[in-house]
Image (cartoon, coloured by chain):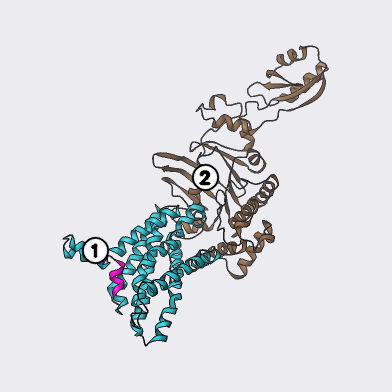
Amino acid sequence: MIQAFDLVKDFGPIRAVDRVGFEVNKGDILGFLGPNGAGKSTTMKMVTGFLSPTSGRAEIGGVNVQENPREAKRRIGYLPESGPLYQEMTVFEFLRFIAEIRGLRGGKAREALDRVSHLCHLHAVRNQPIETLSKGFRQRVGMAQAVLHDPPCLILDEPTDGLDPNQKQDVRRLIASMADEKAIILSTHILEEVEAMCNRVIIISGGRILVDETPRSLIRRHPQYGAVQMQVLDNEHGSARETLLRLDGVHDVEARDEHWLVLPDRGIDDLKPRLWEAARREKWRLISMHDAPLKLEDVFRNLTRPDGESAEERSPPGARNKGSAAPA
Amino acid sequence: MKVTLTLIKREFLAYFRSPVAYVFLTVFLVAATGLPWFLGGFFESNDAGLRPFFIFLPWVFLFLVPAVGMRLWSEEKRSGTWELLFTLPVSTWQAVTGKFLAGWAFVSLAVLLTFTMPVTIAYLGTPDWGPVFSGYLGAVLMAGAFLGICSAVSALTKNQVISFVVSVIICLALVLLGWSAFNELMLALNLPVWLVDTLANFSFVTHFEGMIAGLIRLRDVVFFLSLMLFALCLNVLVLER
């Protein structure tokens, strides 16, 4: 549905986006991650036709955005960063304006307005000027505006930015409810959001794509991927640890407060059954054993560290497909 | 076409959703009708014509049209709504003409609200309606030309103050070039007559003069219309750069 081919954008001497390419299909939610100034917004602006790329092209459902912008824009719903709206208009005046521009008139416009005001819970504020609304409501008006014409493609630039936890949850639910029949791109800073909603992640830094994969395979890049946390009761001083270290597939055992963090050797992803087996054999009294909680944040930090140190050398088992993201 | 109409409607109503419209209309009407009464000797001239009213108009427009035009694009850029606008299925031309026509309609409304002046002369005497109509036509065309320039300038910056000041300066130049006192100054500086005449031909005032006198000349109408078109082309170029 949404395709980008080698998009490049220069602002004067600065290359903001450097050969970014990807493809998003119906049913996909692509999470766009990256530090501030990485080129996320610029990429999205090129895909929506607001900025023209220095080179490369974007296509929406096979329509070239630069050559046929109006046709392409009809198929896109776009929520710009920080949701700019015509502040002096009331919510319904604004949405009616968008509907008219989108070519929805009369009954169709009313239907669309009803649908989105229900979807985004805007009925209570429909006659209020937008400037008097809270941030959460404004964001919802922005969402309503983006989905008003029921577009096949949705591009959302930081849709949950500045919202409180409940509102974030609402917006996420809203996006997830539309996931099946749309191709969605969203950018965010919040990694849990990516984990919860997206089936694909692109991490972009310095204008380049670093990673293009599923959140599940992204987590494999975590230095502690496959590690197990276990707590054993009343072991004799150090003996259990020694046994663990001798165990096949165990790379290291770190002591953490009450428990141990058992790190696997490279390529081992069945550490838990092995430990379980060992515990039974040695008749340890296990209090707990579970996968070490991994944060995508660590992966993100590793990948986008500003010291320029590439994460490649540290890539844990399972990492693959680095940097190559152009669609076939 | 429908898209442009929608844009015109939104933009025109936007003036009235804020106090801008009311402040503007009040100041404009006070200035445009007050100047001929108190400075122009409108009453003392003992003439049932609107000449004293029209000759002040370029000077009133000089400050008030940039006040209308400064927000056209600067405001969109500052608040980021132009990103919204240009990701809707709207071409740059449609957006530019839509906003311009809305502004022009608004300024024209202000001009038409000075109808009390012709009513006054009609009450006090028997006016020659020809120059009144041609003068009003000229005023509306001139306002459009002013506004075209302001619109193009406002597309250059997101700062409304800069937009206003630069617009005033450009418009001032275009008014001064045709002002008789300024022309005499140029001649006194021994500039050749053809040069002074050529420069004067670029002025609003030169082309407006004829219309005040009751002449609707094609070249004057073409001047104002082509100036608007030129400004709008520039406006589109600036936005698409």
Name the residue nearer the viewer: B16 or A302: B16
Q: Which chain is brown?
A: A
Label 1 resides on the chain identified as B
SS for callout 2: helix
Residue A77 picture quarter: bottom right
Q: Is residue B74 visible?
A: yes
Q: Amino acid at mark 1?
A: Leu
SS for callout 1: helix
Where does residue A80 sit, x and y in percent of width and height? 55, 50
The answer to the question of whether label 2 and label 1 lie on touching residues, with beta carbons closer than 8 A, is no
- B237 lies above or below B6: above
- A52 lies above or below A246: below
Dot label at residue B199: 1
Residue sitting at 61 percent across and 26 percent down?
Answer: A317
Image: magenta residue range: B200-209
Q: Which chain is cyan?
A: B
Label 2 resides on the chain identified as A
- Secondary structure of the magenta portion, mostly? helix
Tell me how far mark 2 sits from mark 1, CA to CA: 47 Å
- B26 lies above or below A175: below
Residue B187 picture quarter: bottom left
Q: Amino acid at mark 2?
A: Ser
Residue sitting at 71 percent across and 13 percent down?
Answer: A246
Where does residue A162 sit, x and y in percent of width and height? 62, 45
Name the residue nearer the viewer: A179 or A92: A92
Describe residue A269's horizontal placement relative to residue A209 as left or right. right
